[in-house]
Amino acid sequence: MNYRPRRTMLYVPAHMERFMQKARNLAADSIIFDLQESVPPQYKQAGRDLLRKELLNSTDYQYSELVVRINPLEGEWGEADLRAVADLSIDAILLPRVESAEQLLLAIDKIDSVRSDQVAIMVNIESPLGVLNSKEICAASDRLAAVVMGTTDLSNELKITQTKDRAGLLTSLSLVMLAARAYKRCVIDGPHFDLKNVEACEYSCRQARDLGFDGKAVVHPVQLDYTNDAFTPKQVDIIRAKSIIEAINKANEQGLSAAVLDDRLIEPSLKEWAERVLSLYSTVKELGQNELLGSFR
């Protein structure tokens, strides 16, 4: 059982050559080359041109998954973005502000009309309507590889005051989490924008992990180490995962479906959690990262 790590998904403005080059050596599980929010209108074409130049020259971004966020296909820039990425070697296209299954399916049809590889699709859920329709969105297509929360726009439209505990967002986060898990989709929390407040960012990362998210979007490289760390299995998790698998296997050999470990009943479903933890642990080691800290040695 293999799980593709997306502990960190780093947004990189596609019109900034310095940032594009720096991203080649960063410990981000996924890099999102952004043609949308981080690129001002007057730099949209420059972003497309630079993205093509960089990726046609080399797709060597170490182990990072390569994702491009295009502008809405219903708007004035989306079609040009799509033509710009038609022949680029990328892993996925991220669609902003998806609010319905119909919108997602229409976008997939447009993407397939210019690409022949059935590239993976990701969506931003960043509006109340998107949250309410997240079940239908997650069910719409097996091409959907990940759901990425856009918590800033969502907060604005919910008219909530953002607090450290993100109390006003918890219902929305949980609804999207439930929808994603119901259809076995990867789900990523939105970014933390207070770059100088490390404590608040770490809290947000660990809150996202405890809510069940696979990872978190990142807007600055300074956040990568502690965001990777939050979503990287620790030694105590590894030890417990191995013990659970061993206990379940031993119980199965005895004709039992459940096991007892440290005086606690271990049900078969916990074996899936354990296998996921060990798979992530193995992948992190293969990437040359420190399994305790989640950063390059």
Image: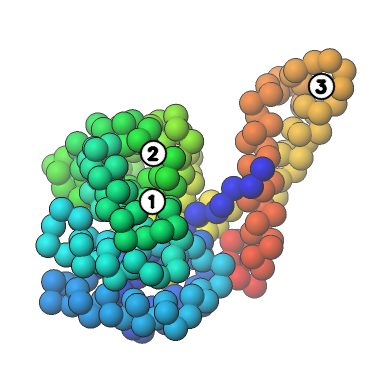
Residue 252 - label = 3
x then y, percent, for residue 200? 37, 55
Q: How is the image coloured?
A: rainbow
Residue 121 - label = 1
Residue type at mark 3? Asn
x then y, percent, for residue 130? 24, 39
Q: Which mark is nearer the camera, 3 or 1?
A: 1
Nearest the eye: 3 or 228: 3
Residue 6 - label = none
Distance (Cα) linking label 2 and label 3:
36 Å
Confirm or deny contact between disc 2 and disc 1 (CB under 8 A): yes
SS for tag 3?
Answer: helix
Task: Check disc 1: other Cα within 10 Å, few if <14, some if 14-19, many if 20+.
Answer: many
Does the image show residue 96?
yes
Sequence-earlier tag: 2 or 1: 1
* Image point (32%, 61%), residue name: 114
Task: Check disc 2: other Cα within 10 Å, few if <14, some if 14-19, many if 20+.
Answer: some
Q: Is residue 275 above or below residue 82?
A: above
* Image point (72%, 38%), residue name: 240
Tell me if 287 is positioned left or right of 162 in this view: right
The image quadrant where one finds the N terminus is top right
Nearest the eye: 183 or 219: 183
x then y, percent, for residue 139? 38, 33
Q: Which residue is mark 2?
A: 141
Confirm or deny contact between disc 2 and disc 3 (CB under 8 A): no
Asked where in the image residue 35 lies, by quadrant, the reply is: bottom left
Sequence-earlier tag: 3 or 1: 1
Residue type at mark 2? Ser
Q: Is residue 18 above or below residue 13?
A: below
Sequence-earlier tag: 2 or 3: 2
